[in-house]
Image (spheres, coloured by chain):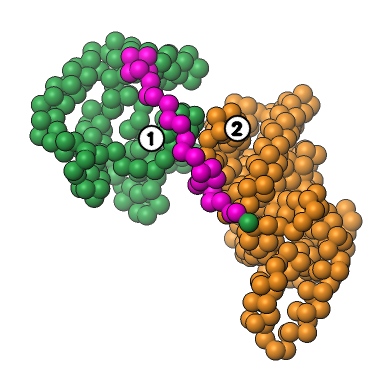
């Protein structure tokens, strides 16, 4: 009897033990949408903190709310992946400082009120009047209190949005990076890489909206910076693996000649990073009109990064080492 | 307050650069083919990627039918992915290269290339018919103008040279029938 047969006939198969079910599209979507939400919160908060006035375009004012909606869709996907869905509340009955999932669960809870206040504080008077009109009578006093709070503590809320956005972005990568048993996730750079990717995909989604010209120019620059940082982090991660022990070399091989080489380099690096950077460079050099294909490619590349890394990590384990 | 759409952040029209000289473009394509042989160990192709994409899509909708088909089933199986092929990635690169080339020349825009009198729907229907005909023929000939004429021709394959002559002969014979659509 081969070890595999013995393992599966005794108990370890997904039919008997659902926890053996590997992470699929649900986690890819969760990490992707979580990254975009983190990027939007970081960028909208940072943009306002570094400029003297509130967001000028309607899209920038409403994007914190869109970020929360995207995050909710991502969390629904995460919830669908759980083996024991109705035990999810137990995350909030404990706090483990060494568990990235515990950090993530609490960051997600804190993000909702912060994002809501960030959005309310961005709204113009006309938009607030519209919101008051739509609010049920019972909730009017709560809405007024939240609007006053969002105005009075605007600086604190922006800084909190920035910190929580960075926390969420890093958490989506740390979730994978703290599992050394998965060789292709075992890198301290996974957190910063997912944060940089979250900022670039968040900027890409913002760039697909109608924006003020000044906002657009700043976002294009930050997007290019985030993509450049992402390229450096990918290079460092692969160099780190390739120059470490057998486990690292196994992880690096997956992307440097192994089964994930073609999809990683073509979809993540070329399609998602190099081509959008080249479009940015051509746009600046030739003063051409902005085209939506750059941000669309960045979003595709961000999704591919999570999909490829998630698959590569799950296909790597110490028992496969030569 | 001025908001601008993503598609037209600048109001001025892009300065279109002239198209490449076709002879220089032909030499460049030959060098791309040489580079493809040297770097990847394969030549260029086009219809193979479309064929794999079609089989992948069909397998999603009707897996049993695809697996029972003698021709399609060679692409499907344990340890195989229908899209895991050099041609699929090459065609993706063709698209990305086309985007960069068109954008740098100020020519990136959505449109239908057609004669002055033909309607959009008729032009698209004719293109679809031509594409279907070409796709079926490429499978019968085991390659298209890229895989057979360009790649096979470059390695002096007799079949590929006969294919190339047949393509030109067929093109010259049929062109008078559809030429008026471009007038």
Query: Which residue is the site of mark 2?
Result: A284
Q: Is residue B82 above or below residue A99?
A: above
Dominant secondary structure of the residues highlighted in magenta in the image = loop
Q: Which chain is green?
A: B
Q: How many residues crowd around disc 1 within 10 Å: few (fewer than 14), some, or many (20 or more)?
A: many
The disc placed on residue B49 is 1
Q: Position of residue A7 (x, y in %)?
A: 65, 50
Left or right of A314: which side holds B112? left
The residue depicted at 63 percent of the width and 31 percent of the height is: A255
Instruction: In this rendered view, identify the residue nearer to me: B62 or B88.
Output: B88
Left or right of A236: which side holds B154? left
Left or right of A308: which side holds B145? left
Left or right of A96: which side holds B45? left
Give the magenta part as a residue range: B2-25
Q: Is residue B105 above or below residue A70?
A: above
Q: Is residue B107 above or below residue A77?
A: above
Q: Position of residue A10 (x, y in %)?
A: 65, 55
The residue depicted at 54 percent of the width and 48 percent of the height is: B6
- Regarding residue A152, the answer to whether it shows in the image is yes
The residue depicted at 68 percent of the width and 39 percent of the height is: A221
Q: Chain for mark 1?
A: B
**Location of residue A313 by image quarter:** top right
**Location of residue B2 by image quarter:** bottom right
Q: Position of residue B65 (x, y in %)?
A: 31, 51
Disc 1 from disc 2: Cα separation: 34 Å
């Amino acid at each position: 009897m081969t070890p595999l047969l013995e393992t599966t006939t005794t108990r370890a198969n997904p039919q008997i033990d659902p926890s053996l079910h590997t992470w699929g599209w649900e986690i890819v979507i969760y990490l992707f949408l979580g990254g975009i939400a983190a990027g939007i919160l970081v960028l909208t908060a940072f943009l306002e903190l570094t400029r003297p006035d509130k967001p000028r375009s309607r899209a920038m004012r409403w994007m914190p709310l869109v970020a929360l909606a995207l995050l909710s869709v991502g969390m629904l996907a995460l919830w669908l992946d759980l083996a024991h869905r109705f035990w999810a509340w137990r995350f909030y009955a404990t706090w483990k400082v060494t568990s990235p999932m515990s950090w993530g669960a609490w960051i997600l809870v804190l993000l909702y009120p912060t994002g809501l206040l960030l959005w309310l504080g961005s709204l113009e008077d006309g938009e607030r009047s519209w919101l008051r009109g739509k609010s049920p009578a019972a909730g009017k006093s709560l809405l007024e209190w939240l609007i006053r709070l969002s105005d009075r503590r605007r600086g604190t809320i922006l800084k909190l949005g920035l910190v929580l956005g960075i926390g969420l972005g890093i958490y989506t990568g740390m979730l994978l990076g703290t599992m050394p048993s998965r060789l292709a996730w075992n890198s301290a750079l996974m957190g910063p890489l997912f944060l940089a990717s979250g900022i670039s995909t968040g900027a890409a989604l913002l760039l697909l909206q109608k924006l003020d010209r000044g906002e657009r120019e700043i976002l294009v620059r930050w997007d290019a910076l985030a993509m450049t940082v992402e390229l450096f982090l990918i290079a460092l991660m692969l160099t780190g693996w390739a120059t470490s022990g057998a486990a690292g070399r196994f992880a690096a091989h997956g992307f440097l000649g192994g089964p994930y080489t073609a999809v990683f380099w073509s979809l993540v690096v070329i399609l998602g990073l190099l081509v959008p950077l080249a479009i940015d460079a051509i746009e600046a050099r030739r003063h051409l009109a902005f085209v939506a294909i750059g941000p669309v490619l960045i979003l595709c590349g961000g999704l591919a990064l999570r999909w490829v890394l998630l698959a590569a990590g799950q296909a790597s384990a110490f028992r496969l080492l030569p | 307050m001025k908001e601008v759409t993503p598609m037209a952040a600048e109001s001025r029209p892009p300065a279109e650069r002239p198209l490449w000289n076709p002879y220089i473009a032909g030499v460049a394509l030959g060098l791309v083919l040489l580079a493809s042989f040297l770097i990847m160990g394969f030549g260029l192709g086009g219809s193979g990627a479309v064929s794999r994409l079609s089989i992948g899509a069909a397998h999603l909708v009707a897996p049993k039918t695809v697996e029972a088909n003698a021709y399609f089933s060679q692409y499907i199986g344990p340890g195989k992915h229908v899209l895991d092929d050099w041609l699929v990635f090459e065609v993706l690169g063709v698209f990305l290269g086309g985007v960069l080339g068109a954008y740098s020349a100020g020519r990136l825009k959505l449109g239908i290339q057609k004669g002055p009198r033909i309607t959009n729907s008729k032009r698209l229907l004719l293109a679809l018919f031509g594409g279907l005909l070409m796709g079926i023929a490429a499978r019968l000939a085991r390659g298209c103008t890229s895989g057979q004429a360009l790649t096979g021709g470059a390695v002096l394959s007799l079949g590929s040279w006969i294919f190339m002559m047949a393509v030109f002969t067929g093109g010259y014979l049929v062109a008078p029938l559809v030429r008026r659509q471009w007038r």
